[in-house]
Amino acid sequence: MKTKIFIALILLFAALSNGFPQTKFDDAVALNFKNITTAVAGYFDNNNNLVVARQIAKEGSYYLEIGSYDENGAYTVKKILDLSNDPNDVKVKFTSDGTKAGILELSPDRIVLTYVDIVYGQIIQDFNLEGISNFFLTPDGRSIVVVAGANTVLFDIAEGEPVMQYSGEIALDISGDGNTLFCRNGSNIDYLDTKTGKKVRTFPLKDFKSIDFDDRGEIMISLTSQGVKLFKLTQESIITLKEIDGVSAMPVASGLFDYFIVDNGAIRGVYNLGGVQMYKSRIDPYGQQKCNFVFSKDDSRMALLSDKGIYVYDFDMIKYYNKIAQKYPDLFITKTQFENDQDQENRASRVKFQKQMMVSNVAEEMKVSEGIIKQAQKNSLGIVDVKVTGLGYYNPNTEMYDVSINVPVDYLNTVSVTAKVKVPKFQAEIFSRNYQNFRAFALRQLNRDQTGVDVFGITIVNDLNSTNYRCIMHRTLPPVKLSYDEEFAAGQKYFEMRNWYDALLNISDFPEDFKKNSVIDYMFTQAITNFFDEKWSYVQTLNPVKDSTAILILLSDFPKSFKNAEDVNRLRQTVVNNIMETRLDRMNQYLSDKEFLDGVEYSKIITTSYFDPYSGKDVEYEYYKSRYIPARNNLLFAAGKRAFEGNNWTLALEMLNQITKDYPQYSDVEKMISDAKYQTNK
């Protein structure tokens, strides 16, 4: 959203003190401007230049100065508007084209709200209403939404008259199309039709300290008493998509909801929508109540307007920071002391001047990397068994059970998570008595960082009455910004295109109240079948020797119901045989090099079976007796014979006694054992 509303203090991202000798340039991606000024509001124009509104005083009069910064940070005054008095606080909100603005002047003895034409410097309309605390402009520029006390009023700008009152509703934000108001009503969030005032939907959201809505109100990010949570609307309810670990400060979402910024203690960070921290920096304290965030329309830039100055950030530089810092270390030195302001300005100018080249170069590399990552994720998609380990509270009103489930965090380790599963009342008792015996599975794939796995589509299978229960509350994939209807349409499109991977991503984790779940269940079943058919063709192209580990991981993704399950097991057997044969070749090399004792020690890792940690299966080494035992006998005989010839009777006996009786030269073995015993007992 272009306007961000918060219930309590806004804790802000990042900046450096600017304009003082010995300034610390701690924040490597901030494009600091030379002008040490403050601003009450701003926006980015179509050229991504920052336009700001400043409150100024001159000769006993008070004004609102509108000016803009170019790419190099040079400031130009565009217009100066009169303010009616000396306001304690000024709130300014611009229209999308920047030609007009609403101005709210707040003073203890007077509140003034006007709508002005910035180009001509004229007041178009003023509004009289007691107790105004906030306002919003509708995108079409025809109306203004005014918050006064516990009520909200819609005014027609041209007439200056109220056309709709929303009693008991405190507007928090307005949708991107202007058709819906997002309001607080006690402990509920109400969505109201802007023109009619009709309540479109409502849902409870208790104890929230801040809330931010995406452009359509489909996704919300909020700070609650339990921490930062990401919510998404279903057709009939609101569900928690994600709880962000380690973040307890109020999040500020970017305009397109691609990022959110938090101030957590002495560190400010930028996170992506999946909750992964992309960037962090130290912070210096400054007045937080009158600070504002401004985002460009394409989410490429962000400005922080604080009482210490104006700081501009480039999200491309934030996104690629680690990569850029490695390639251009001289430009990204943190905690550097500058002798004077000019040194700092020169360094900041170098960053700004070379930013486009740096980002474009890194972006090309990242584009290739993105393709590799997506292909790796596609190849890694599979079905994995998970375990329901505990049962919590059942809410009969929502028909939701809290359950504990062991899910993988990588291919070898699991962690217990709490999820919610919808169980109808008439099945609740059966579920509670038998949940430990129910099968459960999930989809998993490599995460974007290739450091672990994402888990989604957790399903509990009740074999007693052939019912599948969806666990829609646990999904480690980044949230999808589409509505559920749009997700369904995308999944259906990919399904028709026979793009099974993207179809599965888009038709997973739908809530129980979605009206087309029967169609989704059909598509999901068909897509799973076809996806694994294609995946099986891919797996067979890999080399069982060179790609042994990769193959074992991929084979662990196949469900037990896969039609070629016998072939999967056979390939796993082949891979295990090759692993052991490689070890056998190494053992024989010790024999050829006459490093007999080292070879005997190494031979201990060749066993009758191999534990495959990815599938959890012990796989027999088929040639243990036919190849390994004869080869080991040869090695033991050579080691024993050398020890015998060196009169090391104890070692000779240790080696020779391990040779099996089917060894072709066992008569020679028996003779050396007899002689070694004689020599030992002399």
Image (cartoon, grey):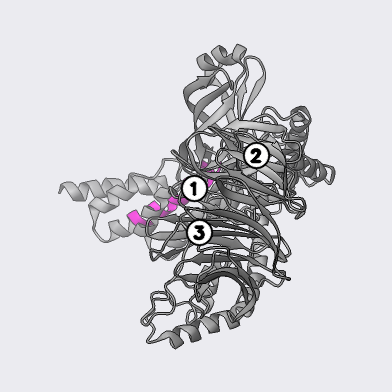
Disc 1 residue type?
Tyr
The range drawn in magenta is 621-640
Q: CA distance from mark 1 to mark 3?
A: 84 Å
Left or right: 203 in relation to 14: right
Residue with the most extreme left position: 682
Q: Residue at 60% across / 45% down in the picture?
A: 147
- Of the two numbered discs 1 and 2 on the same chain, state the one appearing first in sequence: 2
- Residue highlighted by disc 1: 628
Q: Which residue is mark 2?
A: 558
Query: For the residue marked with disc 2, what is the amino acid?
Result: Phe
The residue sitting at 54% across, 84% down in the picture is: 350
Q: CA distance from mark 3 to mark 2?
A: 62 Å
- Report the number of numbered marks: 3
Mark earlier in primary sequence (1, 3): 3
Q: Nearer the viewer, mark 3 or mark 2?
A: 3
Residue beneath disc 3: 89
Q: Nearer the viewer, residue 40 or 595?
A: 40
